[in-house]
Each structure stands twice: as structure tokens, then as C-alpha cells.
Image (cartoon, helix red, strand yellow):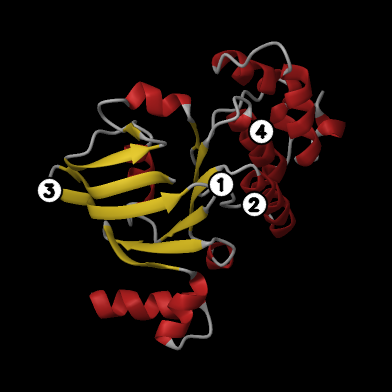
Amino acid sequence: MITIKAVNLTRNFDNLIAVDHLNLEIPEGEIFGLVGPDGAGKTTTMRLLTGILTPTEGEGWVYGKHIVRESEAVKENIAYMSQRFGLYEELTVLENINFYADVFCTPKKGRDELIDKFLGFSGLIPFKSRLAGKLSGGMKQKLGLSCALIHTPKVLFLDEPTNGVDPVSRRDFWKILYELLKEKVTILYSTSYLDEAERCRRVGLIHKGKMLRCDTPDNIKNERKAKTLEEAFINIIKENE
């Protein structure tokens, strides 16, 4: 099953083409890395696919729903964790999760078990009574992910979720994502960390709104005879300048 599909997806802002005829297919249960420098179009792509922005041209589908004609239905099946996810710092960890459970209309029946599950695999059980504002950056990101997942979405959009987070917390964050893949959650993950991109099943290099290359990290490195993904991507960008 193709969970995320974009066909010639395009978004203009006045004279700027932020996303330029992007084509993409992501099957169920895959983690796909969207990689590119700042201003490449990663966030705009996320916002188009989640129905926050309307495309200037082209179409997209998420979990079988059209991102424009069925935008409300799209939102029922997804979670979107933006770069500044809206945690409430004056609320505790548990209060934040319960707040988002109410927002997403998570059924009361079984909610406590679901919350315990997310607190457990994110390592937040000892901190459930701590104010969110008192958490470290890594803990805040794990709490944000738990809040985004409380309604058990089929598709997860993560926009540079570990930006500025310490290496240990980044590793813990990825452990959570791998557990989600076992449940066939599809993940679109944007990052500027190429070591994170290596963890993805496939990666897409986006630059100036265009998708320059899309394949597995190993295939891209082999094709370019590069030792690292960074070396391969620099090669590809230079070739397309």
C-alpha cells in the first residue's frame, strides 16, 4: 500500500518556487528521510502533505485521502510534529498528554494504558509529574512525540524533530521510531543530520524545491562512489547548480 503520494506537487510564494513539481511515493511502514539545506523546501513539503498549505499545482494523497479535497479526513489519520511543537510548559508531562488526548478525542476507554505505553517507551514515567518547562530539550521532544501519537495515527510527519538535541536523546528518539515501524506506522522525517538520514529506509535529497535524488542511502553512496552520504549529496548538488 502506498501511504504517501505526491504528483508534480508545487507551491509558489509570489516569485519563489518553494516546492517544484515534486513526485514521491512512500509505502506503508517505511521511514523516509527528507534531506536538504535550510530553505530547500522540506517544511513546505510537509505542510502541503498535511493539508496545512494548498498546492499551487499538482496533487497529493495521504493514506488514500486527497490532501485538498479530503483535507479533514487526511488529518484524522496523521500526526504532524513541527519544529516548534506546542507543548504547554506550565502543565506537567501527564497533563500535556491528557490535553492532547482530549484534543484528538482519544477514547477514555483504554486511554490510561495508551498513555502508560508512550511514557514507558519514551522513558518519561519518572518525570510524569514534572512541568514540561523544566524538561531537557531531548525530553521535550520525546514528550512532543508522545503527544502527537496519542491518537494512534497511521502516518507520522516529523519536521527536524531532533534539531539541537543532544546525541544520546537523538538515539533514544530513534529507538521510539523503530518501535513504531513494527506497528506499520509510515514516517516522513525531515532532517539536516545526515547520520540520521542513514537510518532511513530511503532518503530524498531536496534542493531549491526540487527532488534531486531518491533512493536508499547505500545505493546513493555506491552510485557516487562516495564514502559518506554527505559526500554523495554535495556531489549531486554541485552537479545540479
Instruction: Say which element carries label 1.
Output: loop
For this orientation, the residue located farthest to the top is: 108
Residue 165, which numbered label? 2
Q: CA distance from mark 2 to mark 1?
A: 8 Å
Query: Given the image, on which type of amino acid does mark 4 rest?
Result: Ser
Task: Return the disc, 3 or 2, that comes first in the chain's sequence.
Answer: 3
Number of the front mark, 2 or 1: 1
Report which residue position mark 4 lands on. 146
Q: Is residue 184 left or right of residue 208?
A: right
Query: Given the image, on which type of amino acid does mark 1 rest?
Result: Pro
Instruction: Say which element carries label 2.
Output: loop
Q: Quadrant of residue 68?
A: top left
Query: Given the image, on which type of amino acid does mark 3 rest?
Result: Asn
Local crowd at mark 3 within 10 Å, few (<14), some, or many (≥20)? few
Report which residue position mark 3 lands on. 15
Percent coordinates x, y for residue 126 in the rendering: 87, 33
The count of marks equals: 4
Report which residue position mark 1 lands on. 161
Task: Return the disc, 3 or 4, that comes first in the chain's sequence.
Answer: 3
Residue drawn at (47%, 85%) of the image: 226
Number of the front mark, 3 or 4: 4
Q: Are marks 1 and 4 in contact (CB under 8 Å)?
A: no
Q: CA distance from mark 3 to mark 1?
A: 29 Å
